[in-house]
Image (cartoon, rainbow, N blue to C red):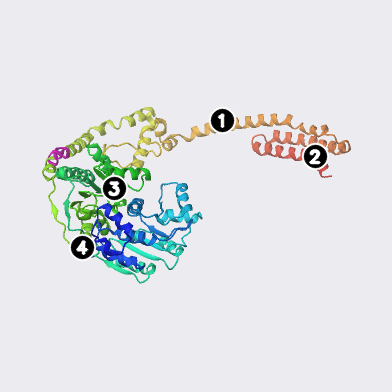
Amino acid sequence: MTSFSDLGLDPKVLQAVADTGYTTPTPIQAEAIPHALQGRDVLGIAQTGTGKTASFTLPMITMLAKGRARARMPRSLVLCPTRELAAQVAENFETYAKHVKLSMALLIGGVSFKDQDRLIDRGVDVLIATPGRLLDHFERGKLMLNGVQIMVIDEADRMLDMGFIPDIERIFKMTPFTRQTLFFSATMAPEITRITEEFLHNPVRVEVARQATTSDTIKQAVCMLTPSRKDRGPKEKRDLLRALIEKEGDSLTNAIIFCNRKRDVDIVAKSLKKHGFDASALHGDLDQSLRTKILTSFRDGELKLLIASDVAARGLDIPNVSHVFNFDVPIHSEDYVHRIGRTARAGREGKAITLCMPFEEKYLASIEALVKTDIPRMDNPLKGETSAPKAEEKPAQRSRPQKNVDKPKPVETTDEKPVESPKPAQRENNKRSDNNRQDSNRSENNRSDNNRRPQRGRGRGRDNGPAVLGMGDHVPAFMTRDLRALQAVVTPKEVEEETPEVVEDQVEVVKDVVVLDTPIEEAPKKPRRRRAPKKKIEEASDTEETKSEEPVTEDAVEEKPAKKPRKRRVTKKKETPVVEETPADEPKAE
């Protein structure tokens, strides 16, 4: 089979293929298309850039040319892992089905539901979608998958390996059992083939080349980088990337630079723009309209450097990509095959350069084991330049220890400072009396050994006196005095002289309190104001009892005024409210 006409395709499809300029099919197309036209399940494995997309679009258009779609019931379904890949498959359908009346709908995120609902309501022959948006439409009741005749999963290993297994299983259960299933991918691990056996019925395995092989038209190279310091690794890596781009010169028409993380994508793009390169970032956090705008500008040649994450590494067909740079060595070795497959497509030549640091060598070893070839190493263009800055950095490193040498200087002067430190102690001792100096100094010396604060840094060897907790260095002078030493110096005679004065003051206060309490005892007259004429007799008896108690309390106060004045004052306050409240509460109860 040397031409598309020998594959059994529809004449209108052949005309569209001829318009694109292709005459001979690729090996994967020549083997997969006949089995697909027979209605069998196909599991296709081939290298990137070998035309896997056309190997399922051409037979689908031929089989769907007869028949008509119903509203909300698509006749075929194509699942893609990313929005960009789904949009690319939709473009291929438009080019190859331009002579056939087939309706198509693209269901991806970042687009309004209204426009997509209108297309589905009219009836769709080919539905291209990502798993998330497809399930959203199904849960809203806008879509039914009972009429699906052909189901295609593009980049099957990525779909099953990136956490889409539950969604795919759910979608397969929605489709009829009699469907035809087509799996196409560049890599297919044995673990994933076991999962595909659940979805495919007696599939035909079409394996053109060995799994995870790279094209012979790609020149691969690895540039090793050992940073001068760990914290300077990312910066020196960006410097190396710019040096490699400048080294390629005019041979670099456009290039894709892959990073492992979205954060690094933005950082590398800003760095290249800052140094005058025409670069732009592409990753999953960008809005869908901005992503499509960047991709179209790169395809049209308006953008020279595209810094992307693995979003752009899966299935994107961007022609005339001359170079691919791996800013980070991919963690998963299979991603390396997809990344470098963006160049040297359709028989063209390309170049792939990988930047590797020491901690990434283990990932590079796994890639070489997968590809089963040793990737050649290339010289670092910054080797001659990196030696000069290292020589310049040495004096800066020497200057740091010089600063540290200056710091111990106050330690040398510590022998002089302890002479000045006792000054605050001398001021405190001058304030004290001459008779109390010896006793206070003895008590301080005995406690200083236990309360001595550990000295650190500057000022070692100082005698700062006993440690004061809670105030730090800013302590008032009166708080540094030792009250226990002052109490020990005071003679007992002074204590005896001071005690009677305190007692007399207390007695006077008690007498004043008693005198003030006497007029308050006339308060029992308040119950007379109440309007209770029947109970005047009881109130009169209560007042007599209070009057009889008053002279007793005065006599007691005169006999023993200074012994227990506080207790008697409390008893008076307790008795008076009891006498007042008892008659007031009884009539309420009655």
Q: Magenta region, mostly helix, strand or loop?
A: helix
User: Is residue 112 shown left or right of residue 319?
Assistant: right
Does residue 152 show up?
yes
Residue 373: image location, x then y, percent: 17, 61
Q: In the image, which is nearer the foreground, mark 1 or mark 3? A: 3
How far separated are the C-alphas under marks 1 and 3? 93 Å
In percent of width and height, residue 155 lies at 32, 59
Q: Nearer the viewer, residue 452 or 307?
A: 307
Q: Residues within 10 Å of mark 1 (few under 14, many from 20)?
A: few
| Residue beneath disc 2 | 584
Q: Which residues are magenta?
A: 389-398
Element type where label 1 sits in the image: helix
Q: Secondary structure at mark 4?
A: helix
Q: Determine whether the residue tagged by mark 3 lies in a helix, strand or loop.
A: strand
Residue 24, placed above or below residue 424: below
Sooner in the amino-acid sequence: mark 2 or mark 4: 4
User: Can you say whether 399 is above or below 315 in the image?
Assistant: above
Q: CA distance from mark 1 to mark 4?
A: 102 Å
Q: Which residue is mark 1?
A: 501
Answer left or right for 390 relative to 174.
left
Magenta-span inclusion, residue 142:
no
**Looking at the rendering, which quadrant does residue 314 occupy?**
bottom left
Image quarter (top left, top right, bottom left or bottom right) of the N terminus: bottom left
Q: Please state which amino acid type lies under the numbered disc 4.
A: Ala
Dot 2 or dot 1: first in sequence order is 1
Q: Residue at x 26, y 34 (%)?
A: 418
Distance between the Cα atoms at labels 4 and 3?
A: 25 Å
Quickly name the residue at label 4.
369
Q: Is residue 397 magenta?
A: yes
Q: Which residue is mark 3?
A: 308
Front: mark 3 or 2:
3
